[in-house]
Image: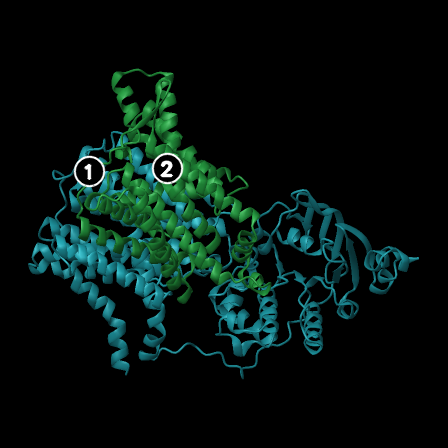
C-alpha cells in the first residue's frame, strides 16, 4: 500500500520529466503538435477556471485576453522583430492590464449578476476583435508570422513550441492549485456561494476578484502568444471566434470547474475526442459526437468529472480526511476577560437609511458600552435589522456617523468593518452551501480581525467554536444536510470564530423550540462573559429579559426608548407602539 | 452581418457618394427593419430566460433549422412561405416542449442550460451541414426584392412584414403577460415557483406552454430569415452576440423591451454602416450594451 501511495505521489514528477524529454527523443513533429494542442487547451481552460470556476463569475470573453496575447505577439515579434521569448511576458502583462481595467469598472457594480458578467465579457471580446480588425493591428487581412525567429529549445521549431506550451500548461496548473489552496482560494469559493456574506465576514471580495481576473487573463495572454507562433498566421476570425470561450467553458464544466485539475482533465478529454475524427466528414461527425457527449455529461454529472471521482480516488490512496475527534477536550467556555469599566464601544449618531422613498432609519442615535448586552426590540419593520445591516456595512447608512472604538466605520467596506472586530449573524442563516460546516467556520476565523488569522490558528478556532455550539460531529457535512436549529448555530459559530469585540445577532432565537432557546441563552451569556459586547435583535421577550442589560426600542425607524428591560417595557410610548394607543392610556 | 442584404438599398446610395439626409433616413428605415428581425429572435430568448430561467443558445440554431426547412419546402415543393409557416409552427412548438421535458427531467440549472443548448446548437448545425452542406443558399422568391416607395425612401416589403410580425407578437406577448390570468400565473411561477404552486398555479404545465411558444417564435423568425438572408450553417453563430445584447438591453421577459432594443441596435448599426464604415457596425451593439450595463438603469 505504501509503495502504491509513493508511486501515486511520484507520478506527477515522473510524468513531467517524461513530457520534457519527449522533444529530445526524435519524436515526429506531428505528435509534438498533437500534444501541444492538448497543452494549449489545458492552459486556456485552467486559466479560465481560476476566475470563473472558483468565483462563479463566468467569463465568456476569454477570447479577449487570449486574443490580446495573440496580437501582442503578432505585433511585437512579427512587425517589430522583438525576440519571441520577450513577447510572452509582454502578452501576459497586457492581458492582465486589460483584465484589471475591465474588472475595476465591472466589479464595482454591486448588482452585477453572474450571467451579466458572462455577456459583458463576451461583448468586450467582440469590441476588441472589432478594434483589432479595423486598425493597423490586423487590418482585416491577418498577420503572417512565418518569418519570426523562435529560440531553439528542443530540436526543432515544433519542439520549441511544444516545450513552451508544456511550461505554460504546467505553470497554469501549479498557479491554479496554489490559488485554490491559499487564503484567497477559500475566499473565492465563498464569493461563489454568497458574495455579500463573504464580504461581511471579512473577505476583500473586490480585491480578490481583481487579482484572480488578472492572473487568469495573464495566463490566457501568454498562451495566446505561444499559439501565435504555433499557427504562424493569425486572423481575427480564428482568434476571436466563439469557439474559444465555448470550448474553454465546456472543458472546465466537463472536468469540474471548482477543482484545480478539473479544467485540465476536461480539456484533455475533449481535445483527444476531437482528434479521433479527422477528415472533413469525420470532423463534422466528431463535432456532433462531442456535442452529444457534452449534453450527456452535463445532464448526468452536473458537478463535472473530477468532483465525482475525487471521493473514490481519496479512498483508493487511503488519504482519509483528518477526522474530527469529538472526545478530545476542547475548551467549551471562552476564556474570561476581566471586566473593564464601562466605556463606549459603538456609537451611532443620526443614522439614516432610505430604500427608494422609504425611510427605514430616520436618524437613530445610540451608544453601546463595552461588555454589555443590548437588545434591539420593536415591531416588524421598525428598522432593527436595518440598523444591524448599517453597522455591519451590508446596507451602508445613507447619512449619519457610526463609530467603533472611536474609529469611524460608516462608509467603510463591510470586510474592513469585519476586520475591526465586528461580526454578525443573519436572521435566515446564509451559509456557504458548497463549503463544509468546518470550512464555513474556518473561513470566518481566517478573515476575522488580524490577531487570530493564520492557517493553524483558524483550524483550531473552527474546532473550538464548533465544540462550543455542539456541532463538532457535523463538521464535515454540507450545510444543506443540517436542520434549521443547527444552521442557526453554525451561523453563530461563524460569527464567534472571528473573535469579535462586538457581536451582532439578528434573531438567532426565532424558530427554536423552548429548550433550544434556553440552550442558546446560556450560550450567549457565556459569550458575554468572555468580554464580547453583544447587540441582539429579538422578538422573544423572555430571552430579552433574561439576557439584556439594556433594551433599545425602535419604532418606524426612530429610537423610542433606551433603558433597563423592565423600565423600558413599561414606558407608555413603547406600549403604544406595540399594542396601540388605547392600551397605553 | 454586414453581408445580410438589408442594407442593399443604401449601399447603392453610398456608391453614388451622396452623404445626405436621404441616406440617413434610408439607413434608419433599414435599421428599424433589421431591428424587427432582432426583436423576433430576441422575443423567445428573453421570455425563456426571464420566465423559465433557461438560457437557450439553441434558439438561433432552431431558427436556422426553420429557415432551411422553409427553403427546402419552397424550392422542391414550391410551398408558399405561409404554408411552410403552418408546418413549422406546430413542429417547433413540439420540439420546444420536448427540449423542456429534458430540462425538467434533469433539473437543469440556468448555467447548465446554456451548455446543454450549446450542445444542441452544435448538433443542429451538424445536421444542417449534413443535409444541406456548408454552402451558402439563397431562397429566391418572386416577391423577395419588392419594395414600397415612400418619397425618396425604399422600404423592403419582406422586412416590413417581418417587423409587423415582430410587433404583433411582442404586443400580444405583452398583453398576455400583463393582462391575463395566464400571464400573471406565469410571472408568479417564474418569481417563486413553490409559492406559486402553493396557490394552485400549475407552473409545470405553464412552463411547457411557454417553452413551446418560444420555440415556435424561433420558427417564425426562421421563416423570415429564409426569405430575407443568405443561409449557411456558419451564420448561426453570427447572430448570437448581437441578439443577446438585444435581450439584455430590452430587459429579461419584457417583450416590448426586446423589440425596442432590437430597433435601437438595428438603427445604430445601420447608421454606423452608412456614416462610418460597415466593419464597425458590430462594435456599436456591444458598446451600447457595455454602456448600459455600466450605467445600470433600473429596468435591467
Residue A77: mark in rendering = 1
The green one among the chains is B
The answer to whether residue A422 is above or below residue A410 is below
Q: Read off the chain for label 1.
A: A
The answer to whether residue A375 is above or below residue B38 is below
Instruction: State the image coordinates of residue A111 (x, y, percent, origin top left).
Output: 52, 47
Q: Residues within 10 Å of mark 2 (few under 14, many from 20)?
A: many
Q: Quadrant of the N terminus of chain B?
A: top left
Of labels 1 and 2, the one closer to you: 2
Q: Could you tell me which residue is drawn at 89 percent across and 60 percent down?
A: A583
Task: Tell me: A315 left or right of A140.
Answer: right
User: Which residue in the structure is indicated by mark 2?
Assistant: B162
SS for callout 2: helix
A178 or B6, nearer to the observer: B6
Q: Read off the chain for label 2.
A: B
B23 or A166, nearer to the observer: B23
Instruction: State the image coordinates of residue A185 (x, y, percent, origin top left).
Output: 42, 59
Q: Could you tell me which residue is drawn at 52 percent across and 48 percent down?
A: B176
Residue A97 visible: no
Give how far apart the Cα atoms at labels 1 and 2 are: 49 Å
The answer to whether residue A522 is above or below residue A199 is below
Task: Tell me: A580 left or right of B166.
Answer: right
A101 or B214, nearer to the observer: B214
Task: Tell me: A406 left or right of A3.
Answer: right
Give the colour of chain A: cyan
Amino acid at each position: 500500500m505504501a509503495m502504491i501511495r509513493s508511486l501515486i505521489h511520484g507520478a506527477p514528477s515522473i510524468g513531467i520529466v517524461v513530457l520534457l524529454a519527449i522533444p529530445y527523443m526524435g519524436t515526429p513533429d506531428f505528435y509534438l503538435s498533437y500534444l501541444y494542442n492538448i497543452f494549449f487547451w489545458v492552459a486556456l481552460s485552467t486559466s479560465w477556471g481560476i476566475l470563473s470556476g472558483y468565483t462563479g463569475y463566468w467569463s465568456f470573453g476569454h477570447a479577449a485576453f487570449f486574443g490580446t496575447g495573440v496580437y501582442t505577439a503578432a505585433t511585437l515579434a512579427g512587425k517589430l522583430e522583438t525576440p519571441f521569448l520577450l513577447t510572452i511576458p509582454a502578452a501576459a502583462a497586457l492581458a492582465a492590464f486589460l483584465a484589471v481595467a475591465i474588472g475595476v469598472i465591472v466589479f464595482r457594480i454591486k448588482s452585477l449578476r453572474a450571467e451579466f458578467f458572462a455577456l459583458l465579457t463576451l461583448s468586450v471580446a467582440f469590441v476588441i476583435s472589432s478594434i483589432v480588425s479595423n486598425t493597423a493591428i490586423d487590418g482585416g487581412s491577418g498577420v503572417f508570422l512565418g518569418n519570426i525567429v523562435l529560440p531553439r529549445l528542443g530540436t526543432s521549431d515544433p519542439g520549441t513550441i511544444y516545450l513552451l506550451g508544456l511550461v505554460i500548461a504546467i505553470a497554469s496548473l501549479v498557479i491554479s492549485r496554489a490559488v485554490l489552496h491559499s487564503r484567497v482560494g477559500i475566499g473565492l469559493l465563498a464569493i461563489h456561494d454568497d458574495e455579500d456574506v463573504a464580504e461581511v465576514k471579512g473577505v476583500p471580495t473586490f480585491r480578490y476578484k481583481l487579482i484572480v481576473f488578472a492572473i487568469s487573463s495573464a495566463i490566457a495572454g501568454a498562451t495566446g502568444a505561444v499559439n501565435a507562433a504555433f499557427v504562424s498566421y493569425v486572423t481575427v476570425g480564428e482568434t476571436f471566434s466563439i469557439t474559444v470561450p465555448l470550448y474553454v467553458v465546456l472543458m472546465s464544466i466537463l472536468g469540474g470547474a471548482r477543482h484545480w485539475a478539473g479544467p485540465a482533465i476536461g480539456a484533455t478529454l475533449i481535445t483527444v475526442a476531437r482528434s479521433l475524427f479527422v477528415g472533413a466528414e469525420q470532423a463534422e461527425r466528431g463535432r456532433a459526437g462531442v456535442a452529444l457527449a457534452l449534453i450527456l455529461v452535463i445532464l448526468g454529472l452536473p458537478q463535472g468529472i473530477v468532483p465525482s471521482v475525487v471521493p473514490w480516488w481519496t479512498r483508493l490512496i487511503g488519504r482519509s480526511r483528518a477526522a474530527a475527534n469529538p472526545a478530545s477536550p476542547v475548551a467549551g467556555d471562552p476564556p474570561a476577560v476581566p471586566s473593564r469599566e464601562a466605556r463606549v464601544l459603538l456609537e451611532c449618531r443620526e443614522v439614516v437609511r432610505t430604500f427608494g422613498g422609504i425611510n427605514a432609519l430616520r436618524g437613530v442615535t445610540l451608544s453601546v458600552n463595552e461588555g454589555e448586552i443590548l437588545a434591539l426590540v420593536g415591531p416588524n419593520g421598525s428598522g432593527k435589522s436595518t440598523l444591524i445591516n448599517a453597522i455591519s456595512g451590508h446596507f451602508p447608512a445613507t447619512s449619519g456617523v457610526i463609530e467603533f472604538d472611536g474609529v469611524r466605520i460608516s462608509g467603510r467596506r463591510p470586510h474592513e468593518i469585519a476586520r475591526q472586530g465586528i461580526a454578525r449573524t443573519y436572521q435566515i442563516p446564509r451559509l456557504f452551501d458548497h463549503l463544509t460546516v468546518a470550512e464555513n467556520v474556518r473561513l470566518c476565523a481566517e478573515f476575522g480581525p488580524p490577531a487570530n488569522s493564520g492557517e493553524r490558528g483558524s483550524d483550531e478556532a473552527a474546532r473550538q467554536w464548533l465544540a462550543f455550539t455542539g456541532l463538532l460531529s457535523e463538521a464535515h457535512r454540507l450545510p444543506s444536510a443540517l436542520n434549521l436549529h443547527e444552521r442557526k448555530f453554525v451561523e453563530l459559530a461563524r460569527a464567534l470564530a472571528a473573535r469579535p469585540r462586538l457581536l451582532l445577532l439578528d434573531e438567532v432565537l426565532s424558530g427554536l423550540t423552548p429548550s433550544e432557546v434556553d440552550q442558546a441563552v446560556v450560550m450567549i451569556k457565556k459569550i458575554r462573559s468572555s468580554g464580547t459586547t453583544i447587540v441582539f435583535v429579538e422578538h422573544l421577550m423572555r430571552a430579552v429579559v433574561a439576557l439584556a442589560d439594556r433594551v433599545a426600542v425602535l419604532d418606524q425607524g426612530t429610537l423610542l426608548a433606551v433603558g433597563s428591560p423592565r423600565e423600558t417595557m413599561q414606558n407608555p410610548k413603547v406600549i403604544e407602539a406595540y399594542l396601540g394607543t388605547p392600551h397605553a392610556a | 452581418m454586414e453581408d445580410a442584404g438589408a442594407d442593399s438599398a443604401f449601399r447603392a446610395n453610398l456608391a453614388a457618394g451622396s452623404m445626405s439626409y436621404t441616406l440617413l433616413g434610408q439607413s434608419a428605415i433599414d435599421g428599424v427593419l433589421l431591428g424587427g428581425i432582432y426583436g423576433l429572435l430576441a422575443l423567445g430568448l428573453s421570455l425563456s430566460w426571464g420566465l423559465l430561467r433557461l438560457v437557450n443558445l439553441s434558439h438561433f440554431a432552431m431558427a436556422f433549422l426553420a429557415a432551411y426547412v422553409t427553403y427546402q419546402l419552397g424550392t422542391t415543393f414550391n410551398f408558399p412561405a405561409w404554408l411552410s409557416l403552418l408546418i413549422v409552427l406546430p413542429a417547433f412548438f413540439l420540439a420546444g416542449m420536448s427540449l423542456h421535458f429534458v430540462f425538467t427531467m434533469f433539473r437543469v440549472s440556468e448555467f447548465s442550460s446554456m451548455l446543454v443548448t450549446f450542445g444542441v446548437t452544435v448538433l443542429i448545425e451538424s445536421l444542417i451541414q449534413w443535409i444541406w452542406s456548408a454552402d451558402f443558399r439563397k431562397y429566391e422568391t418572386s416577391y423577395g426584392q419588392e419594395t414600397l416607395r415612400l418619397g425618396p425612401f425604399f422600404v423592403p416589403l419582406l422586412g416590413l412584414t417581418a417587423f409587423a410580425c415582430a410587433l404583433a407578437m411582442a404586443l400580444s406577448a405583452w398583453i398576455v403577460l400583463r393582462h391575463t390570468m395566464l400571464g400573471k400565473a406565469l410571472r408568479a411561477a417564474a418569481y417563486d415557483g413553490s409559492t406559486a404552486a402553493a396557490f394552485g398555479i400549475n407552473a409545470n404545465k405553464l412552463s411547457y406552454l411557454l417553452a413551446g411558444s418560444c420555440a415556435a417564435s424561433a420558427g417564425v423568425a426562421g421563416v423570415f430569415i429564409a426569405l430575407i438572408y443568405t443561409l449557411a450553417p456558419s451564420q448561426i453563430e453570427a447572430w448570437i452576440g448581437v441578439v443577446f445584447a438585444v435581450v439584455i438591453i430590452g430587459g429579461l421577459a419584457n417583450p416590448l423591451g426586446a423589440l425596442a432594443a432590437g430597433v435601437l441596435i438595428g438603427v445604430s448599426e445601420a447608421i454606423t454602416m452608412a456614416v462610418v464604415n460597415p466593419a464597425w457596425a458590430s462594435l456599436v451593439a456591444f458598446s451600447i450594451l457595455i454602456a448600459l450595463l455600466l450605467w445600470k438603469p433600473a429596468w435591467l
